[in-house]
Amino acid sequence: MAEVIRMPRMSDTMTEGTFVEWHKKVGDTVKNGDILAEVETDKATMELENYVKGTLLYIGVEKGKSAQVDQVIAIVGAPGEDFQALLTEEKSKAEEKTESPEKKEETPKKEEDNTEKKEEATVEKKEEEKAEVKQEKSAEIKESDDERIKVSPLAKKIAGDKGINLSDVSGSGPEGRIIKKDVENFVPQVTEKEKVEQKIPRMELRESFGEESAEDVPVSQMRKVIAKRLSESMFSAPHFYLTVSINMDAAITSRKALNDVSPVKISFNDLVVKACAMALRQHPNVNSSWMGDTIRINKHINIGVAVAINDGLVVPVIRFADNKSLAQIATETNDLAARAKSRKLQPSEWEGNTFTISNLGMMGIDEFTAIINPPDACILAVGGINQVPIVKNGVIVIGNIMKVTMSCDHRAVDGSVGAKFLQTLKQYLEEPVRMLL
């Protein structure tokens, strides 16, 4: 008996997926575990496994098209089996779900509204026509003593609204009087000189500046989810921002010494991840989530690291970061970032963050503010390291300063809590040896 295959929910935030490639075609024999297709979700391109044994009888979504979660995407059954009745039944169910009873009730109401509007429009039109006739007749077509052009009041008003010079209009009323239809039917005459003058500036503009153009680019599944989640975060969570300047002189020296002996190159971002994990141990209220009726204080420290890819942004997670060495953090971050850019991450690798770091310092950004990444209560925006004059022991010297800004959800984290966390973070980065103890 034929069975339908539906679009599975391949991540916690997925609502639909786009088919990048079908690895099977109609008529192919499929078994459990076969890869039917590659599907682009909001986070990564993932393989869609088959779970029904038989022959692929029907493919419901073309390559490049999207399907909603639970939508029928394929049918598997015996070779030559008639699946049309099953497909018709599934389509009917889908239509019943999308059709709202309220819409059915509104239909006759809309028809009544349209009828009433038509009747009102007809009455208004008749009233306008009566007013116009009355105005033209009652004026006897009045004119002032000093007015040399004979024109009805209504025609004069229309001409004024349209910017028509009445001296250019020929009247068809009694004694050459200008009436309504003369103004409405008036077509201004354009001289050859005026035609040339009108063409010249248009040609100059076109030659000087080119033609306007635009392109509408389809929104990817990832970009749709980014837009939805961050909009919800920005407009539901009351953000406030705390910025601190950190002297990275010691961090620069320590990083060089560590890289001389480390099996993997340690970056400044790895130092920030480790320092945040250590600081979160001491300030667990920052490692929290707003749950509505409760605030969840996470006992584990999973740090999300934002990675930019072509379609948007993904946040792979370094789990239990406080228990890992700098070398382990560096190795894991490099691996996750590489697989994020190739869209090969698995859901377990981008879910479960309790705190997030977004670093744009390597792109020349001095400082910025970031939107909180749900369900976290805080996100740290890291800027670049810049050489600036600083006062040290009463003397002006050159220091390597990095600015970080933490965005906090005020429902879960107060200003003093966030400030104390940043003080601890600053201590770890200004004295990196503290992280090695």
Image (spheres, rainbow, N blue to C red):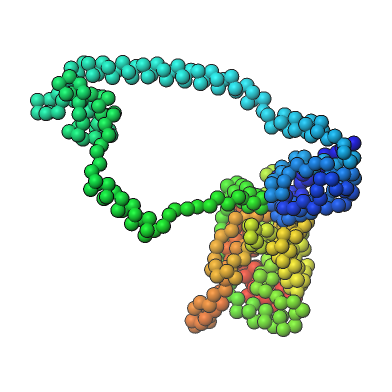
Q: Is residue 277 above or below residue 217?
A: below
For this view, does 89 lie left or right of residue 276? right
| Residue 380 image-quadrant placement | bottom right
Quadrant occupied by the N terminus: top right
Q: Position of residue 240 (x, y in %)?
A: 56, 55
| Residue 287 image-quadrant placement | bottom right
The residue shown at (29%, 28%) is: 184
For this view, does 339 lie left or right of residue 250? right
Q: Closest to the observer: 207 or 142?
A: 207
Q: Is residue 429 above or below residue 298?
A: below
Q: Position of residue 142 (x, y in %)?
A: 16, 21
User: Please, which residue is most extreme toward the left here?
Assistant: 145
Quadrant occupied by the C terminus: bottom right
Q: Closest to the observer: 109 or 88?
A: 88
Q: Position of residue 414 (x, y in %)?
A: 61, 55
The residue shown at (37%, 60%) is: 208
Q: Position of residue 323 (x, y in %)?
A: 78, 67
User: Please, which residue is most extreme toward the front here?
Assistant: 192
Q: Closest to the observer: 148 or 282?
A: 148
For this view, does 60 lie left or right of residue 33? left
| Residue 188 image-quadrant placement | top left
Residue 111 visible, this orientation: yes
